[in-house]
Image (cartoon, rainbow, N blue to C red):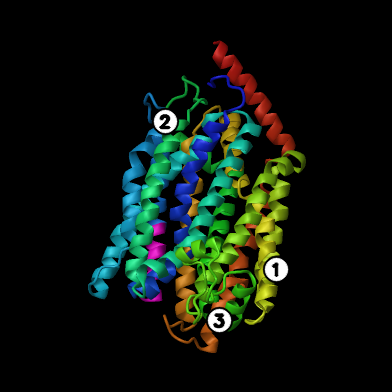
Amino acid sequence: MTTPTKGLSRSEKVGYSLGDIATNFFFMSMILYQTRFYTDTVGLSGAAVGLLFLLVRGADAVFDPIVGALSDRTNTRWGRFRPWILWTAVPFGLVFWLVYRSPDASQGVKLAYAAVTYVLLMGLYSANNTPYSALTGVMTADDSERTSISTYRFVAAMIGQFLIQALTLPLVDKFGGGNSAKGWSMTMGIFGAVMIVLYLITFATTRERVLPNPKQKSSVSQDLKDVFTCGPWVMMFLLTLCVFTTLVLRGSSMNYYFAYYLDQGQLKEFLGKVGLGSMGTGELSWWKQALDALGLIAKPDGSNSASVALSFFLMAGNVIQIVGILLSKPLSDRFGKKAVFLCGMGLSTVVTVAIIVIPPTSINMLFFVSMLWPLGWGPTVPLLWVMIADVADFSEWKNSRRATGFIYAGILFALKAGLGFGGALSAWLMAAYDYVPNAVQTPHALLGIRLCATVFSAVPFVLGLICLAVYPIGRDLGARVQRELAERRAAQATA
């Protein structure tokens, strides 16, 4: 059943989107910084970190279908999915902070602490984000409105990414004052508190309107059968696995790429050209003072050039990516979601490989080529989640049963598996190429860093493009599903 609605209010869309700012504080920290935090700050070996990521993220992925099944069967005055956001807000933000604390203890105790806090964090992520993602599919039944919701959501996600990418490493340097463990703890404590507030706002401002047929019988075994026999869901599962393997492998590798491969003198010179160089005598412009307070100005000795430069690259890419997200809806309305996804992901794949040929001193060239990556990726960002809502509709159309939470949970299982596999690959490849933390790297180690950031990262994207090409829900089939489901729901409401 569906409660009839016109277009959703802007305040509800904004309220929903704030949840993804919070999620991206966690998510982008994990993609960009967690591997290096564990190896360089906590002091764990690359092999241990890789095994930790693979086991924890892989095992925790099993929890997503459980949460999906439970949320589908939750029945409160607040709905099925919103209560989960409320219940998990405080513990999620608190445990996020605990993950980035480094106890002064033996290696064994540090590894155990990392494993326990990380298991808790990933479990809370499942309990929070599976229902949060499924909420998109039940706020409205209108396909165009869903795309609009996702556009709001992922513009907000880019804001969250922008803040994490811009502020994390500079604040760690500034708060730590040479003690990176203290810097990480203070920085992530602030982000964790903001996460809690944003999730509570999301809960308070959203509503659920699309409900299952009241005559639908509850059956986990039938949910499993419906999902695993749904061809579009299988393709989206594999696509999600490939996408997030690449995002983690590339994101974590770029951290090492900027710190060790790129010429630090050229980075410092580049930062001076874009206005982020060290402040000379008498330079008291308010904006430079503000940036310096946030740690976003290179020091005279260039010791923080890599972190400031990486933050600048990520911020600039985020601006372009936000423009791409805003164009996602008009582009997909005109050309179809699948076509836009194929073209955008194809461009990002080519750019990922192309960076391998750029020498360490050519920072200007690297910046130009790097900005082509978000140009392609931006329009695809909302489409993955909108297409999963399409899969939920397709499954209902085909099987006369709706299991929104379970379908989203299966995709989040793939996301978690991709995060685990990508994180493990990043740590293991660093170890295989003889990476040594906080030291001058050998040519062999530098080759490994370059390959991880480029060629190795592109391979899962290529596999994802193949899955996307096989995905069967195009414009015509999608329109038919929407039309016939609307007719069924109208008949159910009348009955």
Q: Mark 1: few, some, or many residues within 10 Å (few <14, many ≥20)?
A: few
**Disc 3 element:** helix
Residue 342 within the segment the image draws in magenta = no
In front: mark 2 or mark 1? 1
Which amino acid, mark 2? Arg
Residue located beneath label 3 in the image: 264
The x, y position of residue 197, in whole percent, is: 39, 43
Q: Nearer the viewer, residue 371 or 373?
A: 371
Q: Is residue 66 something one can see in this rendering?
A: no
Residue located beneath label 1 in the image: 368
Magenta residues span: 44-57
Q: Is residue 28 left or right of residue 267?
A: left
Q: Is tag 2's residue or tag 1's residue first in the polypeptide sequence?
A: 2
**Disc 1 element:** helix
Residue at 69 percent across and 44 percent down: it is 337
The x, y position of residue 150, in whole percent, is: 58, 41
Q: CA distance from mark 3 to mark 2?
A: 52 Å
Q: Mark 2: few, some, or many residues within 10 Å (few <14, many ≥20)?
A: many
